[in-house]
Image (cartoon, grey):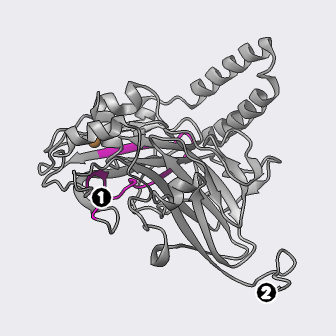
Amino acid sequence: MNKNHSDQEGASRRNFMTGTVAVGAGLIMAQTITSDVQAATHKTEKEIASLPRVKQEMVAPPFLPKHDQVAKGGPKVVEVRFVIEEKLMVLDDDGAEIWALTFNGSVPGPMIVVHENDYVELTLVNPASSAMEHNIDFHASTGALGGGGLTHVSPGEECVLRFKATKAGVFVYHCAPGGAMIPYHVTHGMNGAIMVLPRGGLKDKAGKAVKYDRAYYIGEQDYYLTKDEEGEYIKYETAGEDYSDSMKTMATLLPSHIVFNGAVGALTGDNSLTASVGETVLIIHSQANRDTRPHLIGGHGDNVWSTGSFDDDPQTNLETWFIAGGAAGAVTYTFKQPGIYAYVNHNLIEAVLKGAAAHFKVDGKWDNDLMMQVKKPTAI
Ligand SMILES: [Cu+2]
């Protein structure tokens, strides 16, 4: 009963907001309605304790954990566990490597998937073997620096943070220990994303359900490696040893690498993303530090939530879309032709020379109606 009531309230809030935000008096009323909705979904500690609890098994990107596109039942407490891992990662075959700072060992960290008004209960573990203190700031959460103020864990400590996912959309999370350590940790890979689905699932701009057959998470990462006088990347023995070199290189704002999912080639060749003609693919793209502009070469963005907010209507049929640094965006595309598609950051220098490229391998039947080679290149 309660769940249906709050779902309806959520839907009417969205309609109401869409219709009235341009009018002054309407804006005041909209704010009142919003507070009413918050009051309607507000739960006491006792009520939260009685909610169903589910454990979400984390998987490494580009994959997403098992999830329902449309929520079954009312709000839940979704338990997730992140273990921090400081590890040496090879970025390219030219000697580029980094002591990456990671959540669960991957760059980006794992995608969390919940529904609006679910509670995320994160256990954050910093093993005794770590060199550094870490924490986590969830852009999807409200208060205490996104939880950053409540999650500082030194090596050998763990903590538990619970937050309510009140906003539907895709959002970045990242480590933010304070001061210069914030960009240092973020540019060493310590970031990821959460998807908060509307309880009724995604909708297109006409309000029709958007279902996806596959979903992939692409985390774009800028790295700032330092070279020695001979032009070779400097190697370090332990995590954190590159700190002073990193500070100087980061200050130039000139990344040595801009890659998808941690390293050059992480999503190309044998690691290509796959799909079939006729399948709708949801692609979530995050960039915790720097603006980017994804583009699917030979395809489009059918529905694009460029800002990441699922409460806003998606834009349609885009060639390239913008994702602001510190944000995630989502797009659906239904593949219509087989072949290899490059999915790139369409600053093509960043894609080709810095590494920001992935491949989709799509099987199926070619459609001559959409395109055909009428004449092969032949001598004139
Ligand atoms: Cu950190």
Query: Relative to the observer, which residue lies in front, 213 or 70?
Result: 213
Q: Give me the residue at 86% from left, 83% from top.
A: 374
Q: Amino acid at mark 2?
A: Lys
At which x and y percent is residue 347?
58, 51
- Closer-to-camera residue (297/130): 297
Disc number at residue 105? 1
* Cα–Cα span, label 1 and label 2: 48 Å
| Residue 219 in sight from this viewpoint | yes
Estimate how packed mark 1 is, as few (under 14), some (14 to 19) or many (20 or more) residues with alpha carbons within 10 Å. Answer: many
For label 2, the residue is 376
* Highlighted range, magenta: 95-123
Question: Does 73 appear above or below 175?
Answer: below
Is 102 one of the magenta-colored residues?
Answer: yes
Query: Where in the figure is residue 283, as x and y percent of width and height?
Result: 59, 58
> Depth-wise, is mark 1 or mark 2 nearer the camera?
2
Is 252 one of the magenta-colored residues?
no
Left or right side of 223 for 89: left
Give the vertical position of 311 relative to 192 (above or below).
above
Mark 2 is surrounded, within 10 Å at the Cα level, by few (under 14), some (14 to 19) or many (20 or more) other residues, namely few
In this picture, residue 280 sits left or right of residue 350:
right
Q: Quadrant of the N terminus?
A: top right
Disc 2, SS:
loop
Question: Where residue 269 sits in the image (x, y, percent)?
Answer: 48, 76
Residue at x 37%, y 37% (from the top left corner): 252
Residue at the extreme front of the image, as rendered = 380
Amino acid type at mark 1: Gly
Q: Quadrant of residue 215?
A: bottom right
